[in-house]
């Protein structure tokens, strides 16, 4: 399973990349606004931190304008992936980008049928938002499972990029049901390593080791 980082925080992305936990990055207009940075500049800097896909989202609502924006964003770096909304206009733009071999991430997916449409137009990634479904007491994980079944039934190559990941259980659940990619905030990725028994065990090992008076180096 690939790990994408859902953030424009350069330091946090670099730190995780250094550990080997960054296969790509996703952003959205809210993340860019929160960064307070110039959109193209920050995407260019993120693209230098990973050879993987970096999703940059279009703002236009008409397919022709999305295509123009997407082609402009692709000039930033070879690993820019154009993020398109799951609307009929977004699908139309995706269909054309597929023909032009431009990588695409179709976002704001909340139903299996929406994911089916994205696969039909050759999206590189589909982004089902599981946290936002959970927020309204629907089952985000069930959506990932349904999309997995549909894509496997027909051999669609679109990768399931589980998004709106809010906690470590979301990551585990997505891995269990076969999401191809998860995108999560840096804090969630970091907390995957945490376990109270790991901390307690290490503390015990250090105490016993120190009592031996030995050193390895
Ligand atoms: C995905 O690409 C989105 O940027 C993101 O996962 C949305 O997460 P949120 O629902 O926590 O805002």
Image (cartoon, rainbow, N blue to C red):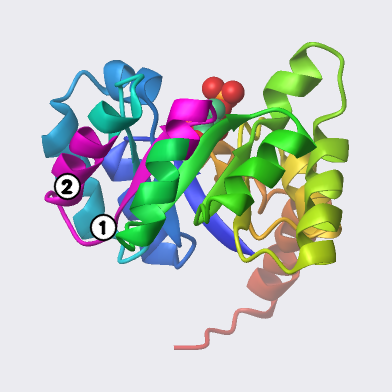
- Of the four image quadrants, the one with ligand 1 is top right
Q: Secondary structure at mark 2?
A: helix
> Is residue 76 rendered to the left or right of residue 59?
left
> Is residue 65 rendered to the left or right of residue 131?
left
Q: Secondary structure at mark 1?
A: helix
Instruction: Indicate the position of residue 167 as horizontal and vertical percent values.
Output: 70, 34
Label 2: how many Cα within 10 Å (few below 14, some 14–19, many 20+): some
Q: Quadrant of the C terminus?
A: bottom left
- Determine the residue positioned at 53% across, 84% down: 215
CB atoms at circles 2 and 1 under 8 Å apart? yes
| Residue with the mark numbered 2 | 45
| Residue with the mark numbered 1 | 49
Q: Is residue 129 above or below residue 161?
A: above
Residue 97: give its label: none
Instruction: Indicate the position of residue 107 as horizontal and vertical percent values.
Output: 53, 34
Which segment is the magenta one?
67-91
User: Which residue is nearer to you in this view: 130 or 83?
Assistant: 83
Do we see residue 173 in this rendering? yes
Q: Quadrant of the N terminus?
A: bottom right
Instruction: Indicate the position of residue 11 as horizontal and vertical percent values.
Output: 29, 43
> Is residue 185 rendered to the left or right of residue 149?
left
Instruction: Indicate the position of residue 182 as horizontal and vertical percent values.
Output: 61, 49
User: Which residue is nearer to you in this view: 199 or 88?
Assistant: 88
Label 1: how many Cα within 10 Å (few below 14, some 14–19, many 20+): some
- Determine the residue positioned at 15% across, 47% down: 44
């Amino acid at each position: 399973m690939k790990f994408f980082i859902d953030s424009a925080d350069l330091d946090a992305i670099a730190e995780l990349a250094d550990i080997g936990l960054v296969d790509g990055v996703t952003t959205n207009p809210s993340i860019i606004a929160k960064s307070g940075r110039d959109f193209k500049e920050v995407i260019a800097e993120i693209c230098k931190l990973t050879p993987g896909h970096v999703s940059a989202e279009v703002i236009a609502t008409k397919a022709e304008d999305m295509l123009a924006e997407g082609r402009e964003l692709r000039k930033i770096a070879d690993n820019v992936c154009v993020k398109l909304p799951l609307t009929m206009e977004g699908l139309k733009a995706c269909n054309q980008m597929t023909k032009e071999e431009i990588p695409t991430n179709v976002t704001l997916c909340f139903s299996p049928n929406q994911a089916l449409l994205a696969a039909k137009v050759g999206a590189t990634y589909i982004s089902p938002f599981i946290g936002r479904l959970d927020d309204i007491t629907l089952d985000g994980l069930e959506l990932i499972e349904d999309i997995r079944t549909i894509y496997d039934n027909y051999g669609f190559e679109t990768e399931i990029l589980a998004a709106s990941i809010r906690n470590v259980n979301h990551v585990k659940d997505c891995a269990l049901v076969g999401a191809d990619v998860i995108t999560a905030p840096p804090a969630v990725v970091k907390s995957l390593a945490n376990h109270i028994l790991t901390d307690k065990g290490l503390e015990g090992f250090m105490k016993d080791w120190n009592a031996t008076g030995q050193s390895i180096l």
